[in-house]
Amino acid sequence: KVPYIVSGKSYTAVAINAASKAGEWIKSRLGTVEQLNTKQSSADLVTEVDKGAEQMIRRLILTHFPDHAILGEEGVEPGAEASARALEAAREEEYLWIIDPVDGTTNFVHSLPFYSVSIALAHRGEVIVGVIYDPSRDEMFVAEKGKGAYVHGNRMQASREETLGDSLVCIGFPPDRAYAQPLNMKITQVLTPQVRGIRALGSAALHLAYVASGRLSAYCEIGLNAWDVAAGALLVQESGGTITDTLGRPYDLSVRHIAATNTAIHSQLIQVLKEADATGL
Ligand code: IPD
Ligand code: CA
Ligand code: CA
Ligand code: CA
């Protein structure tokens, strides 16, 4: 059974159905990966499942919207410069789908059931639909611009903590060992003694979905790409949360260093990042 297939051909329905079908296939491949390829370092993995899922999602989208543009992680050369170039070339498209077929590839490869499919649709650079699917828990997170964010059809609301001290905060460690990892370690070091708990679960998209659903108070990470963040950014905004760059400036598709919170603790988090000189900006 493929869960969450919805009827209709709206952008959101197509995104949900593509995430659902790809997610089911990805889950069926858990523990079967034989060939492991690396991109820029031994921490930067890609498998035939990443590529197969991206192809599947592309096909499903283009069946319905043949003249829309698609930016998918596995269609772009590795590295920050190539990602920036690919985004620059695509961001003015009238309709641009931004896909991360498997977010959390390292978890997937290790059979750790915390990974997701992330699909966003941007209209002239502004995200209007965001869908993140977690096949392990069968959870479909959906947001439409101006219409709220939902999981299992229930409206999501970011959490209520008002201080960092009461907050559960998530961080991440991208494969870029030279630049991003040291900064994220610095953030971890300054935040850990100031918050209730710190976590790194290994899927940027699910971290953002969890900020939107109130399971995490905040998430920040240096060194992400548009496909890690686009769908989750809309989920956070539509659930009453806030997402900015690490200096507190508004989110757009080119922001790679992100801070996402329940809004109440946003300025406190940005302040800590600035004081520690850990914004990467
Ligand atoms: C990665 C995951 C990870 C984050 C990295 C991302 P991928 O995406 O989201 O949590 O720390 O920055 O690159 O490569 O598994 O799609
Ligand atoms: Ca990757
Ligand atoms: Ca990713
Ligand atoms: Ca990926």
Image: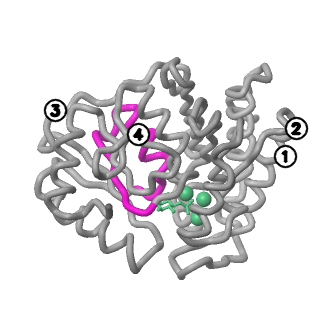
Residue 223, position as x, y percentages in the image: 43, 63
Span of residues in magenta: 201-223
Q: Residues within 10 Å of mark 1 (few under 14, many from 20)?
A: some
Q: Residue at x 49, y 34 (%)?
A: 234
Residue placed under numbered mark 2 in the picture? 63
Is 228 positioned to the left or the right of 119 in the image? left
Under circle 3, the secondary element is: loop
Relative height, residue 198 to residue 20 (above, below): below
CA gap between label 4 and label 2 equals 31 Å
Q: Earlier in the sequence, mark 3 or mark 2?
A: 2
Is 197 positioned to the left or the right of 89 in the image? left
Q: Amino acid at mark 4?
A: Tyr
Quadrant assignment for ligand 2: bottom right
Mark 4–mark 3 CB contact (< 8 Å): no
Q: Amino acid at mark 3?
A: Glu
Under circle 2, the secondary element is: helix
Residue placed under numbered mark 4 in the picture? 210
Quadrant in which the N terminus is drawn:
top right
Residue placed under numbered mark 3 in the picture? 162
CA gap between label 2 and label 1 equals 6 Å
Q: Earlier in the sequence, mark 3 or mark 1?
A: 1
CA gap between label 3 and label 2 equals 46 Å
Residue placed under numbered mark 1 in the picture? 59
Q: Earlier in the sequence, mark 4 or mark 3?
A: 3
Q: Is mark 1 within 8 Å of ligand 4?
A: no
Mark 4 or mark 3: which is in front?
3
Q: Residue at x 56, y 55 (%)?
A: 103
